[in-house]
Amino acid sequence: MNYKKLLHYFSLFICITLIAVCFMPWVHYNSINETFNGFNVKKFATGVYYGRAGLIITYFVIAIITLTILPFIAAKRANMFVCALLVAYTLRTYVIFTGSIFEGEVVKLAGIYLIVLLSFVLVICSIFPYLKDEETFLK
């Protein structure tokens, strides 16, 4: 089996895992005794909502799944762009969720690390796209 074909299926598995990670706990704020994940929406007195990041990550992942399945070279190039946007958004999410004024206020949990790691893995998988026509061309 071709390594690009394995990366193709691996990227689909990573996409599903990334959606599941949005339901895991990301951070715990000690000052308000709240644990947040990607879909835990809470409005604070300052008007800031936490918890919409999982919805946007899910939209990105659905686009990545669609572009991964499509057998066109233009879709593979667009997939690289969308994966890069996903990395930028997950890094932004990491900074926003873990930023605090006081030391020890935020406890980072496994989910916040996994969204960044899995998005980087998706970029690596998108760099090596799988095309069926390429397989017959190389033989």
Image (tube, helix red, strand yellow):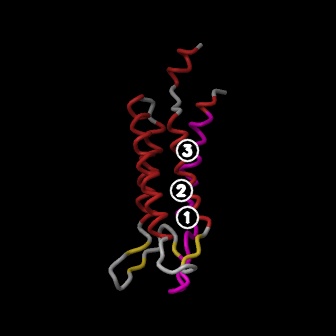
Tell me the CA gap for discs 1 and 2. Answer: 7 Å
Describe residue 83's horizontal placement relative to residue 21 as left or right. left
Tell me the CA gap for discs 2 and 3. Answer: 17 Å
Which residue corresponds to mark 3?
Answer: 12
What residue is drawn where x is 38% and y is 82%? 44
Are dots 2 and 3 in contact, CB under 8 Å? no
Which numbered disc flags the more N-terminal residue, 2 or 3? 3
Location of residue 78 (image quadrant): top left
Residue type indicated by callout 2: Val
Q: Is residue 72 magenta?
A: no
Which numbered disc flags the more N-terminal residue, 3 or 1? 3
Which residue corresponds to mark 2?
Answer: 116
Tell me residue 26's x, y (percent). Answer: 55, 69
What residue is drawn where x is 55% and y is 64%? 112
**Foreground residue among 126 and 135:** 126
Tell me residue 65's x, y (percent). Answer: 47, 44
Describe residue 113's horizontal placement relative to residue 82 as left or right. right
Of marks 2 and 3, the one in the foreground: 2
Q: Is residue 29 magenta?
A: yes
Are dots 1 and 2 in contact, CB under 8 Å? yes
Helix, strand or loop for disc 1: helix
Label 2: how many residues lie within 10 Å, few (<14), some (14-19) or many (20+)? Answer: many
What residue is drawn where x is 58% and y is 61%? 113
What residue is drawn where x is 36% and y is 76%? 48
Magenta segment: 6-35
Location of residue 1 (image quadrant): top right
Residue type indicated by callout 1: Ile
Describe residue 17's horizontal placement relative to residue 77 as left or right. right
Residue type indicated by callout 3: Leu
In the figure, 74 relative to 64: above or below? above
In the figure, 4 relative to 35: above or below? above
Q: Residue 112: which disc?
A: 1
